[in-house]
Image: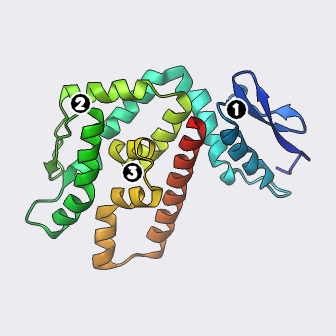
C-alpha cells in the first residue's frame, strides 16, 4: 500500500492522546479509536508513521500493534489476559534448573537466583525451584498474590507484559522490567541463559543469531512501550 497522508501529528483527546494523519484520528485494526494514555506513548506511535517511506511497511508498526492489542484484545478480557500471564508464572523458566551436579546449574544460580529472590521479596510470594523439567506448581498464596498484582495494571501495561513474558518465558523477568526498571538487554540475557550456554559450547548459527536479534528488538520495544504508557 502506498503512503496516503502528508502530515502526522498527535492530539489530546478525551481519555488520552491520539495520532492523527492529516487531522484524522487513527483507529485500531478492529475499528476502535486508538487512544493511548500518555503523550509519550502517542509520540512513539507517531514516529512509526513518520518513518514510513512511499510504500507502507507494516513490520515497523510494533508500538501500534501493542496499542491495538491493548484496546481490542486486553480491554474486553482483562481476566483472560491475567490468566495468560499467570501461566508464564506457573512455568517460569527461571525456576526450572539443571541438576546441581551439572556445570550449567552454577550459571543459573548466579544469574537467576538473585532475580527470583528479589521477586519473592517484592511480592511477598514464594516460587518453587525445580531441578529438571517436571512441573511443580507454586503455592496457591503465591499465585493469588500475583493475580492481585496483575489485575491492578492498566490494559496497555498488560499488553506490554504479555510480550515481555512470552519472549522471556518468565513473569519474573517481565515484572522486573516494570518494578525495578531493569535493563532490557540484561534481563533478556538472563532469560536466555540456557541458550547462551549452549552457544558457548557449540557456537551460534546464522539463523539463531538472526532470531535472537529480532526477539531482543521486540523485547526492548515492549519495555519502552510499558514505560511510556505508565509515565
User: How would you rate the neighbour count of disc 3 (Cα within 10 Å): few for under 14, some for 14-19, many for 20 or more?
Assistant: many
**Which callout, 2 or 1, points to the residue nearer the camera?**
2
Q: Position of residue 87 (x, y in %)?
A: 33, 35
Left or right of 230? Residue 188 is left
At 63% from the left and 48% from the top, the residue drawn is: 62
Of pointers 2 and 1, the one earlier in the residue sequence: 1
Q: Position of residue 20 (x, y in %)?
A: 82, 36
User: How would you rate the neighbour count of disc 2 (Cα within 10 Å): few for under 14, some for 14-19, many for 20 or more?
Assistant: some
- Where disc 1 sits, the SS reads loop
Residue that mark 2 sits on: 142
Residue that mark 3 sits on: 168
- Where disc 2 sits, the SS reads helix
At 53% from the left and 61% from the top, the residue drawn is: 214
At 86% from the left and 32% from the top, the residue drawn is: 24
Q: CA distance from mark 3 to mark 2?
A: 20 Å
- Where disc 3 sits, the SS reads helix
Residue that mark 1 sits on: 28
Amino acid at each position: 500500500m502506498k503512503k496516503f497522508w502528508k502530515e502526522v501529528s498527535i492530539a489530546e483527546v478525551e481519555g488520552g492522546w491520539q495520532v492523527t494523519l492529516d487531522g484524522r484520528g487513527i483507529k485500531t485494526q478492529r475499528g476502535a479509536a486508538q487512544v493511548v494514555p500518555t503523550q509519550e506513548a502517542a509520540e512513539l506511535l507517531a514516529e512509526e508513521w513518520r518513518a514510513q517511506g512511499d510504500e507502507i511497511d507494516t513490520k515497523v508498526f510494533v508500538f501500534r500493534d501493542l496499542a491495538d492489542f491493548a484496546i481490542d484484545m486486553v480491554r474486553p478480557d482483562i481476566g483472560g489476559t491475567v490468566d495468560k500471564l499467570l501461566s508464564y508464572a506457573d512455568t517460569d523458566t527461571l525456576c526450572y534448573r539443571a541438576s546441581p551436579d551439572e556445570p550449567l546449574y552454577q550459571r543459573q544460580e548466579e544469574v537467576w537466583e538473585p532475580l527470583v529472590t528479589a521477586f519473592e521479596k517484592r511480592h511477598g510470594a514464594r516460587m518453587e525451584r525445580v531441578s529438571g523439567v517436571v512441573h511443580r506448581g507454586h503455592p496457591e498464596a503465591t499465585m493469588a498474590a500475583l493475580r492481585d498484582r496483575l489485575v491492578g495494571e492498566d490494559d496497555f501495561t498488560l499488553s506490554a507484559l504479555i510480550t515481555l513474558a512470552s519472549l522471556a518465558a518468565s513473569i519474573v523477568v517481565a515484572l522486573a522490567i516494570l518494578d525495578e526498571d531493569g535493563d532490557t538487554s540484561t534481563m533478556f540475557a538472563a532469560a536466555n541463559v540456557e541458550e547462551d550456554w549452549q552457544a558457548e559450547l557449540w557456537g551460534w548459527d546464522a539463523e539463531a543469531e538472526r532470531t535472537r536479534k529480532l526477539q531482543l528488538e521486540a523485547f526492548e520495544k515492549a519495555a519502552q512501550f510499558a514505560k511510556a504508557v505508565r509515565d
